[in-house]
Image (cartoon, rainbow, N blue to C red):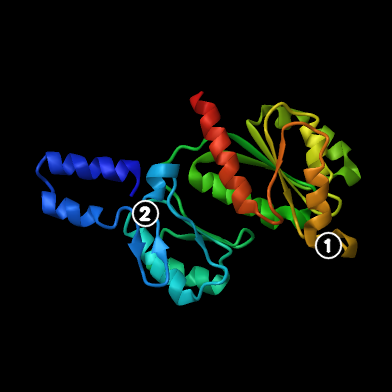
């Protein structure tokens, strides 16, 4: 249950539109709900500002559908990551508002009439990094951040990035997604004053070791203010960027 949903329920009780027993029935599943194979954390929205997100990897379609159905009863925003098309179709049959972002492999339901806040900029080194960047973008947008994109500006043609410096300077948070040698976050980190979230991707030739080379480069960045996510973790980057962005607006 979201803070708004809890406030609405308590208001309805005070106004006599909902009985105390009916409210108690709704509150029984507020902390968590046991589905047998999963325990849904319905309290997460109150603690962290966004409901539990469904990771579809490793789950059957039936399990994802059951989890989704229970989460949708709370009427909040919804996010399911690493969703293949067959899973996305099953989710969309539950709610026609659900939208599938194929590049990001995300199914999302946005908050109704939610105004996007702040300014998150997502930068990629190459086009092959776009799927991970899109996972970060959709995540941050569904959570409520205003997001802009600057793609394919890697160090193999650094003039492409330097020609867009003002866009870097205008951002509150920059997510930099790169595979291969993973150098781009250090370059961006040396240009901007805002936090930089580096995301290594698994794209690259043999010695990239599935993104490990990029990860190690980013962890050893000489630029200050660069934090590093795990390989291909666009969701984690989008979630963290949103929190930094929103907290920055409140200070």
Residue corresponding to mark 2: 42
Q: How many marks?
A: 2
What label does residue 243 carry, if any?
Answer: none
Q: Residue 76, position in %: x, y?
A: 37, 51
Marks 1 and 2 sit apart, C-alpha to C-alpha, by: 38 Å
SS at circle 1: helix
Residue corresponding to mark 1: 209
Residue at horizontal 39 percent and vertical 70 percent from the top = 66
Q: Tag 2: Cα neighbours inside 10 Å, few (<14), some, or many (≥20)?
A: many
| Above or below, comparing residue 148 to residue 247 in the picture | below
Q: Residue 212, position in %: x, y?
A: 80, 57
Q: Nearer the viewer, residue 224 or 171?
A: 224
SS at circle 2: loop
Q: Nearer the viewer, residue 43 or 172?
A: 43
Which of the two labelled residues, at mark 1 and mark 2, occupies the earlier sequence position? 2
| Above or below, comparing residue 251 to residue 212 in the picture | above
The quarter of the picture where residue 83 lies is bottom right
């Amino acid at each position: 249950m979201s803070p708004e949903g809890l406030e609405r329920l308590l208001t309805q009780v005070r106004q006599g539109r909902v009985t105390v027993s009916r409210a108690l029935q709704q509150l029984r599943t507020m902390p968590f709900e046991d589905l047998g194979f999963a325990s849904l954390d319905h309290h997460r929205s109150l603690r962290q500002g966004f409901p539990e997100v469904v990771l579809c990897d490793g789950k059957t379609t039936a399990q994802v559908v059951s989890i989704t159905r229970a989460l949708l009863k709370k009427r909040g925003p919804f996010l399911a990551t690493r969703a293949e098309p067959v899973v996305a179709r099953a989710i969309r049959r539950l709610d026609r508002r659900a939208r599938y972002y194929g590049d990001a492999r995300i199914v999302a339901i946005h908050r109704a009439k939610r105004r996007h806040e702040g300014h998150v900029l997502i930068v990629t080194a190459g086009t092959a990094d776009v799927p991970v960047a899109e996972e970060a973008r959709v995540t941050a947008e569904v959570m409520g951040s205003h997001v802009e994109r600057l793609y394919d500006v890697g160090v193999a043609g650094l003039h492409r990035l330097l020609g867009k410096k003002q866009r870097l300077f205008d951002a509150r948070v920059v997510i930099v997604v790169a595979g291969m040698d993973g150098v781009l976050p250090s370059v961006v980190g040396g240009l901007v004053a805002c936090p930089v979230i580096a995301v290594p991707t698994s794209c690259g030739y043999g010695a990239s070791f599935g993104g490990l080379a990029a990860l190690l480069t980013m962890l050893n960045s000489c630029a200050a203010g660069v934090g590093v996510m795990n390989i291909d973790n666009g969701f984690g980057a989008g979630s963290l960027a949103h929190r930094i962005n929103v907290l920055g607006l409140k200070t």
